[in-house]
Image (spheres, helix red, strand yellow):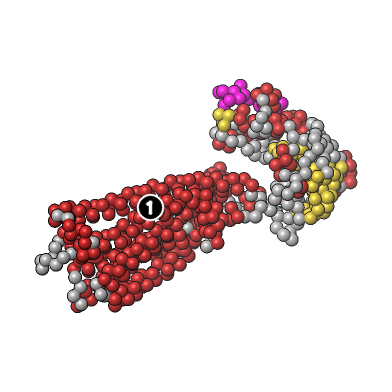
Amino acid sequence: MKNLIYFLKRFMLPHAGMFTMVLCTGMIAAAASGAGVPFMVKYVFPVVFRNENGAMPELLELIPSLQSLSPGTLLMMACAAMPAVFLIRGVAMWGNAVLVSVLGIRILETLRMQVFSRVQELPIAFMESRKKGDIISRILTDTANVQSILTTVSNDLIKQPIMALCSISAFVFLLVASGQGILFLVNILFIALAAWPIIEFGRRISQKSQRAQQGLGELNAAVQQNLENQREVRAYAMEERQIEYFANASRRLRTNLVKLVKYQKALIPVMEVVTALALAFLLVRGRLYGLQLTDFMAIAAALFFAFDSMKRAGTAWNRFNEAQGAIRRLAEVLMEPNNIPEPENPKVFSSPVRGEIRFRNVTFGYEPDKPVLRGVDLTIPAGQIVGLVGPSGSGKTTFASLIPRFYEVSQGAVEVDGIDVRELRPHDLREQLSLVGQQALLFAGSIRENIRLGRLDATDEEIIAAADSAAVSKFLESQPQGIDTELGQGGAGLSGGQRQRVAIARAFVKDAPILILDEATASLDAESEREIQEELDKLAQGRTTLIVAHRFSTIRNAHRILVFDYGRIVGDGTHEELYANCPLYKELYDRQGIE
Ligand code: ADP
């Protein structure tokens, strides 16, 4: 509930004017059906079908001025009243439906945009703790679900009870007018009885749909994992097992959906049986106590509309319960505290930024009490090229990730040019950094646009110069439109080495004082690695560079090497010094020599 209120405040309040119009049109439609039709039956129909005994219709007694009209005019007016009520009802319903849809479309857009923008600023740790498929389904599917609750459901949850209230009032009025007070009490009991399945089914639907949603998430994850690893799936002939895994997830989802559907679809028949019971009771009672047919019809119509709107409100309530999961999942994204907050009074770098990095007694762990880096304390002077080596899992990547403040240190501080990274705006800090990872991240667009991502205001000359420096130019000739060749999503159309060159060109354009190369050549063959190494060496010149190394060939130009072991730095020096004094380094180096 707390979440719903949050969503209503954040997304409905800005559209309060439109929502009021939605409610007004809804109420007009509700009043026209809930009260208009029963009154029509009771007061207008008798004007058309006069009693055989010639008694004056009640309406003419209530509004004596009508008696002066000629019988023909009166008949015409009476006959026109029904279409008039339905016209009002129709126009109001149309307006209501259009307004609800437009409101929904607007809210969906805002919701989608805000969730997507929020994802951009959420801590990297949040992303890593969730599967990509899950985040995609939050941005696309959950937003649509929540939008439909915010509009349709909140409309129905307000409109239908009002309609029920209108019908119940009409019904009470009609019963009292025809002297049937006791019927009123009994039917109120029926109405209370009808509320029970709404509440009980709502509770069950909420439970079952949570489970169905989880099942859908599992299925999404299975598809995603399979699609991302198609090569492995084929190479290890895992197709059968993958299909089985998918089938199991699919079966679990089906079982949950079937359970859900049983309750979803039970509400309407149950309510109809209750309505029929109430009507039957009305019939018997009416027969015994001489209720007039028009009175009976009017009361029956009011009762029917009352139950009908309760049924609709019940369905809306079910939808609301069903969508609780989506609300919770979106609230998690929108309300997740940003544990990489912007400082209140950010410091700014004095220009030019030199790129000196200092780790002050840093301890860090992805999970509390499980430190991955322990007591790291060192300074990397501006312009130094530093190689990070150590066994896999010893903390090299983690060390490099703390500089752009992808994670928050548990103890100590990381400083750039003497300023604690927590005192800088993350954007200002990251502007001073280029990162070339194992897989070049390319987006759909031309090669030129992909290079320009390094610095959006780079001139065409700068982009060409960067392409030259990164030897992108070398393979441009083989591309159909040179630098303007369009790439597919993820850089499809280029080889691994070519993609890496585009990423290096991007770093040249950015021209940041700090450079992090995180196993930049790890996925390349020896030949491409050797070629790209030259461009990387050029890129590193004059920048503070950290090279997370898997092969020693990538750090041959390093001024200094840090040796990591279980989150500690156990060696710090040049290759010669370490080879002589650091047993772990010697062991790693010798082992690679043999390989
Ligand atoms: P290296 O780069 O030296 O191979 P990492 O810095 O990647 O080592 O990892 C150090 C340790 O931290 C490993 O035990 C690894 O399992 C763990 N680790 C790395 N990334 C994460 C993460 N995103 N969440 C949780 N644990 C992680």
Q: Residue at 14% of width from left, 56% of height from top?
A: 71
The image quadrant that residue 284 belongs to is bottom left
Q: 182 or 485, which is in the foreground? A: 182
SS class, disc 1? helix
Which portion, as a residue range, is magenta?
469-485
In the figure, 112 relative to 353: above or below? Answer: below
Q: Label 1, on which residue? A: 25
Q: Position of residue 488 (x, y in %)?
A: 55, 33
Q: Residue at 89% of width from left, 42% of height from top?
A: 577
Instruction: Answer whether residue 39 is visible to the viewer in this image.
Output: yes
In the figure, 388 relative to 369: above or below? Answer: above
In the figure, 375 relative to 552: above or below? Answer: below
Q: Is residue 593 left or right of residue 455?
A: right
Instruction: Answer whether residue 214 is visible to the viewer in this image.
Output: no
Q: Position of residue 442 (x, y in %)?
A: 61, 35
Can residue 307 be found in the magenta stretch? no
Whether the residue under disc 1 has CB within 8 Å of ligand 1 = no
Q: 151 or 498, which is in the foreground? A: 151
Q: Position of residue 280 (x, y in %)?
A: 24, 72
Can residue 472 be found in the magenta stretch? yes
Q: 357 or 112, which is in the foreground? A: 112
Q: Amino acid at mark 1?
A: Thr
